[in-house]
Amino acid sequence: QQQVKQSPQSLIVQKGGISIINCAYENTAFDYFPWYQQFPGKGPALLIAIRPDVSEKKEGRFTISFNKSAKQFSLHIMDSQPGDSATYFCAASPDSWGKLQFGAGTQVVVTP
Amino acid sequence: DAGITQSPRHKVTETGTPVTLRCHQTENHRYMYWYRQDPGHGLRLIHYSYGVKDTDKGEVSDGYSVSRSKTEDFLLTLESATSSQTSVYFCAITGTSGGKSYNEQFFGPGTRLTVL
């Protein structure tokens, strides 16, 4: 069974809007929570990552919010742009070099 | 692309035939991984390696074997391909290179495998 549950499956947002993707996990041994971005025909690429000792991490227009007690974390894409149209995967691992458990992915489409 | 190549990039084969996919890195990273990507499942770990000749199973290892005889190469073999192994396969690497420790996995461009 999938150890990391991701929602929604797909998302359409207007340019300038906010995209929000949510993930939940069960394994309390997870200690590293990255988000990957994937464009069609390409391999995933790391977008931003967080460890559970902080509740929020921001890099440019991308923010991870982390709720350790609820075992949930989310990605917010502010001021969404058409170039952000891609599939986004959350993941979790016991450490940054460990075996990643991926969510099922969210396809984000940003309309002009 | 972080010095990772995968070959072949596309392959069509028939059920029951053996298939070997190759991942080659130029980064001298210690850790290498094989994932498969299927709609609705994200990426799932097949096998991984934490050094030359050191490998271990991931969550979907049945029907797959791996070998790593050199730091730079990690081979994935389907001993007898089945239609359920039709997928996109990604290799990833991470570790320490040039005195710098990386916290992310770098992914290759993928191999699209179709088993008829």
Image (spheres, coloured by chain):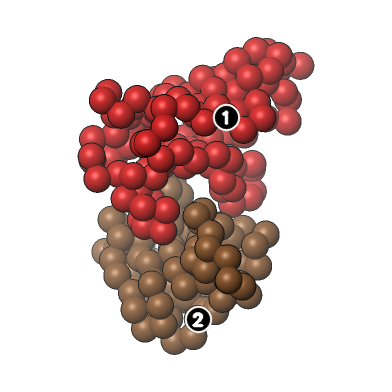
Chain colours: A red, B brown
Residue at figure coordinates x 28%, y 40% from the top left: A3
Residue at figure coordinates x 56%, y 46% from the top left: A46
The chain holding disc 1 is A
Query: What secondary structure is found at the residue carrying circle 2?
Result: loop
User: Is A56 left or right of A80, judged from the image as shown?
Assistant: left
- The residue labelled by disc 2 is B71
The chain holding disc 2 is B
Residue at figure coordinates x 57%, y 29% from the top left: A58
Label 2 and label 1: CA atoms lie apart by: 35 Å
Q: Out of B6 and B116, give the one closest to the viewer.
A: B6
Query: What secondary structure is found at the residue carrying circle 1?
Result: strand
Residue type marked 1: Lys
The answer to whether residue B3 of the structure is visible from this angle is yes
Displayed quadrant of residue A66: top left
**B39 is higher (above) or lower (below) than A99:** above
Q: Out of B45 and B3, give the one closest to the viewer.
A: B3
Displayed quadrant of residue A91: top left
Look at the numbered discs 2 and 1 and tell me whether their residues touch, using CB distance below 8 Å. no
Residue A93: percent from left, percent from top: 35, 48
Q: Nearer the viewer, mark 2 or mark 1?
A: 1
Residue type marked 2: Thr
Q: Are marks 2 and 1 on the same chain?
A: no
Q: Residue furthest bottom?
A: B69
- The residue labelled by disc 1 is A58
Residue B93: percent from left, percent from top: 51, 64
Displayed quadrant of residue A71: top left
User: Is A26 left or right of A40, judged from the image as shown?
Assistant: left
Residue A68: percent from left, percent from top: 30, 29
Q: Residues within 10 Å of mark 2 (few under 14, many from 20)?
A: many
Q: Out of A40 and A98, give the one closest to the viewer.
A: A98
Residue at figure coordinates x 23%, y 39% from the top left: A28
Report the quarter where the N terminus of chain A lies: top left
